[in-house]
Image: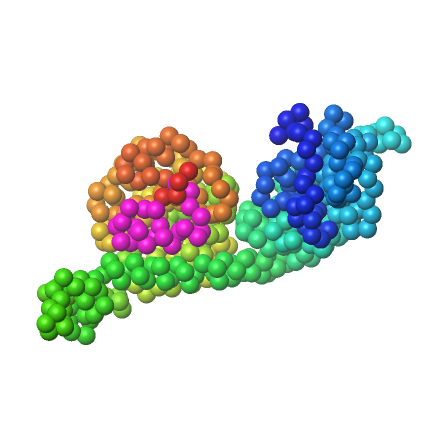
């Protein structure tokens, strides 16, 4: 949003007025808790606001006036343009300094008229101090956003090659993606620290996702394996009784089981095969991280045979590393081009039981290979009985950029492409395993 687009309505004084940390969070320059207003104000207002943007004079009086002025001052970033006349001290001043270091705009140096800009500097010590400051003044979710902005805005990715710096950052999925993109540029002295950071993120994701995924898919596999002529020890009595309630004989107070429902005895054998085909181009970093975790979870289920394939213009099969998702992630190579057709050709060649196979393509569909061949391959797999799922992203990052023409072509083949959150993925997989319609989220 441009400066001219903004109104001068001050932030509400009676909302989240708790501690200084919360107030700074809500007014603080793109570090907020997911609101667009916070993000835009950080970029355009802090340390150099347009002189035409001034708070409503009415905010200087009435209940909560001082708090409203304080919020405006934090939003506008100080200087002659803020129009509040409100000085910051103590924790507020420190918060403002941390925000200015990242989001400050260019201003004229009063002493020499030279153009200058606030920033973190190029040295690891100054960045390390700044990282410590933001962890002191802001909650973890905000710290992660500020770290990501620092890497994007100020080009600090190379500093992550230093073990001391890497140990100071707040670990999250986006940081893992940045580390993976550094690839071979990472020295051996940093690699172990990087693995520890990645391990922490992966462990957190597994704690959040693994149990629910296993429970959901186990139920789906059981339902898909029901048999109608079970042995006595394999009868599912609960389902059998429900299926035969219409045959209840009141005089005998019993149900006549005309139809038996049983558990399939394939519980010790592989029931379904899953192929995860993951685009490892740079824009798919968060999806690669989540797919690696899900791949490891699926591989731990005896009833599933899981294969994990990553691709750019080359195809790499990482199935043999699925016992450890960290090994999977360090086996990827983020960046480069995309050849979806080649990747699908490889996956297709590994399918042995099409009617019992689910292929999950995770890609933004920007195809650098042969488009028509890619579509023919998808059509052939579906015709053979394969359940084909196309995910534009597997992350919490919202709607991704993607090739709409290719997405429409897949939808015409009966394989709609859509973005999926990690929390929804187990339901998507359960539906695919049971050959039910996919629970596609509304857009």
Res. 105 visible in picture:
no
Which percent across, then down, holds residue 389?
Answer: 33, 45
Res. 268 visible in picture:
yes
Q: Is residue 292 left or right of residue 359?
A: right
The stretch of residues the image draws in magenta is: 418-439
Residue at image position (51%, 44%) is 397
Which percent across, then down, holds residue 206?
Answer: 47, 60
The answer to which of 395 and 316 lies nearer the viewer is 395
Residue 431 falls inside the magenta stretch: yes
Against 79, residue 208 (above or below) is: below
Residue at image position (76%, 27%) is 51
Residue at image position (62%, 30%) is 1
Against 59, residue 347 (above or below) is: below
Residue at image position (22%, 47%) is 385
Q: Is residue 335 left or right of residue 149?
A: left
Which percent across, then down, holds residue 356?
Answer: 24, 54
The answer to which of 187 and 78 lies nearer the viewer is 78
Q: Based on the displayed image, in which of its 4 quarters is residue 231 positioned?
A: bottom left
How is the model colour-coded?
rainbow
The answer to which of 310 and 207 lies nearer the viewer is 207
Q: Is residue 246 left or right of residue 152?
A: left
Which percent across, then down, holds residue 41?
Answer: 66, 35
Number of marks present in the image shown:
0
Q: Is residue 324 left or right of residue 374?
A: right
Residue 229 falls inside the magenta stretch: no
In the rendered view of the protein, which quadrant contains the C terminus?
top left
């Amino acid at each position: 949003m441009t400066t001219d687009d903004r109104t001068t309505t001050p932030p509400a004084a009676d909302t989240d007025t708790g501690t200084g940390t919360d107030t700074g969070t809500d007014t603080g320059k793109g570090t907020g808790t997911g609101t667009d207003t916070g993000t835009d104000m950080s970029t355009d207002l802090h340390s150099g606001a347009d002189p035409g943007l001034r708070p409503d004079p009415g905010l200087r009086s009435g209940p909560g006036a001082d708090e409203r002025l304080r919020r405006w001052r934090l939003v506008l970033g100080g200087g002659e343009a803020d129009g509040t006349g409100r000085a910051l001290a103590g924790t507020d001043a420190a918060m403002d300094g941390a925000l200015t270091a990242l989001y400050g705009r260019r201003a004229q140096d009063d002493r020499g008229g030279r153009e200058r800009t606030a920033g973190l500097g190029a040295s690891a010590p100054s960045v390390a101090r700044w990282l410590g400051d933001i962890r002191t003044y802001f909650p973890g979710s905000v710290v992660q956003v500020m770290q990501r902005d620092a890497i994007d805005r100020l080009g600090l990715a190379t500093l992550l090659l230093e073990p001391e710096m890497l140990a100071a950052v707040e670990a999250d999925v986006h940081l893992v993606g940045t580390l993976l993109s550094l690839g071979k540029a990472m020295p051996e002295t940093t690699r172990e620290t990087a693995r520890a950071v990645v391990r922490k993120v992966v462990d957190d994701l597994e704690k959040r996702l693994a149990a629910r995924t296993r429970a959901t898919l186990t139920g789906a596999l059981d339902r898909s394996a029901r048999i109608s002529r079970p042995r006595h020890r394999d009868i599912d009595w609960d389902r059998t009784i429900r299926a035969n309630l219409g045959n209840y004989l009141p005089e005998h107070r019993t149900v006549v089981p005309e139809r038996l429902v049983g558990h399939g005895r394939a519980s010790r054998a592989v029931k379904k095969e899953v192929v995860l085909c993951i685009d490892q181009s740079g824009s798919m970093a968060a999806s690669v991280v989540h797919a690696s975790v899900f791949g490891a979870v699926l591989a731990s289920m005896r009833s599933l045979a899981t294969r994990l394939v990553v691709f750019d213009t080359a195809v790499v099969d990482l199935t043999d590393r699925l016992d450890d998702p960290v090994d999977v992630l360090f086996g990827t190579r983020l960046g480069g081009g995309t050849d979806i057709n080649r990747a699908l050709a490889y996956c297709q060649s590994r399918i042995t039981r099409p009617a019992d196979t689910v292929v999950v393509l995770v890609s933004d569909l920007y195809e650098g290979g042969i488009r028509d061949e890619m579509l023919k391959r998808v059509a052939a797999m579906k015709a053979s009985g394969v359940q084909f799922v196309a995910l534009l992203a597997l992350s919490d990052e919202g709607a991704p950029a993607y090739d709409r023409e290719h997405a429409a072509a897949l939808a015409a083949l009966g394989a709609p492409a859509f973005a999926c959150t990690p929390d929804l993925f187990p339901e998507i997989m359960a539906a695919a395993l049971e050959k039910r319609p996919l629970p596609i989220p509304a857009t």
